[in-house]
Amino acid sequence: MRVLHAMLATLAVVPPLLAAEAPEQVRGATTVGLVQALHLHYHGALFIDVRSDDHWRWGHIAGALHLPLAHEFGELEDPSIPRELPLVIYCDSELCASAPRAVERAVGWGYRQVFYFREGYFAWQLADLPLGKAQASPPVPLSARAR
């Protein structure tokens, strides 16, 4: 019984592990919903998936470039990449903090057309829009894709 009381007392001190919502907007970027993201996809904007490698392999938006926030995302800082390039940055959903952090960085690096797809991959998938699966990132350097 003492063990049970000790465990309950410990749980009362530990804060609940609830996911926090990502911000609705990021200064310097335009937040887009599913319809706007689809329009941008149709018109050739560069979609950037900032999720982990595992999430990327499970599925991603067709044609997206995988630049995980923890690793390759810094490639966008390269000054040879045109700052007019429209970027649509996304994560899993409104509960993912990686996309808004990535959007802040892109804006800070001077990109002028940064779109924050807050709803992310799960909304895209639920709408049955074009997906890519079980593929690695294209071996094409980002600076070459941007031209």
Image: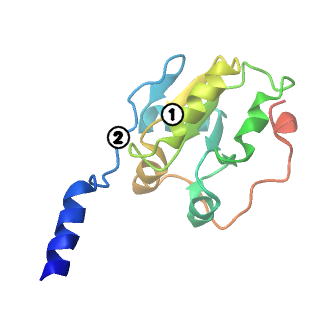
Q: Hey, which quadrant is residue 118 in on the image?
A: top left
The amino acid at mark 1 is Pro
Q: Is any atom of residue 39 visible in this view?
A: no
Q: Hey, which quadrant is residue 1 in on the image?
A: bottom left
Secondary structure type for disc 2: loop
Q: Which residue lies furthest to the left in this view?
A: 1
- Label 2, label 1: how far apart the Cα atoms are: 11 Å
Vertical order, 29 against 15 (above or below): above
Vertical order, 137 against 42 (above or below): below
Residue bearing the label numbered 1 = 100
Q: Where is residue 54 in the image (x, y as percent from the top left)?
A: 60, 64
First in sequence: mark 2 vs mark 1: 2
Q: Hey, which quadrant is residue 90 in on the image?
A: top right
Q: Is any atom of residue 36 visible in this view?
A: yes
Residue bearing the label numbered 2 = 21
Which of the two residues, 14 or 83, is positioned nearer the viewer here? 14
| Label 2 CA crowd tier, 10 Å (few <14, some 14–19, many 20+) | few
- Left or right, 81 with respect to 68, comes to right
- Left or right, 81 with respect to 18, comes to right
Q: Residue furthest bottom?
A: 1
Which residue is rendered at x = 42% and y = 42% of the image? 119
Q: Position of residue 126 (x, y in %)?
A: 40, 55
- Left or right, 20 with respect to 142, comes to left
Colour scheme: rainbow
Secondary structure type for disc 1: helix
Which residue is rendered at x = 52% and y = 46% of the image? 91
The amino acid at mark 2 is Glu
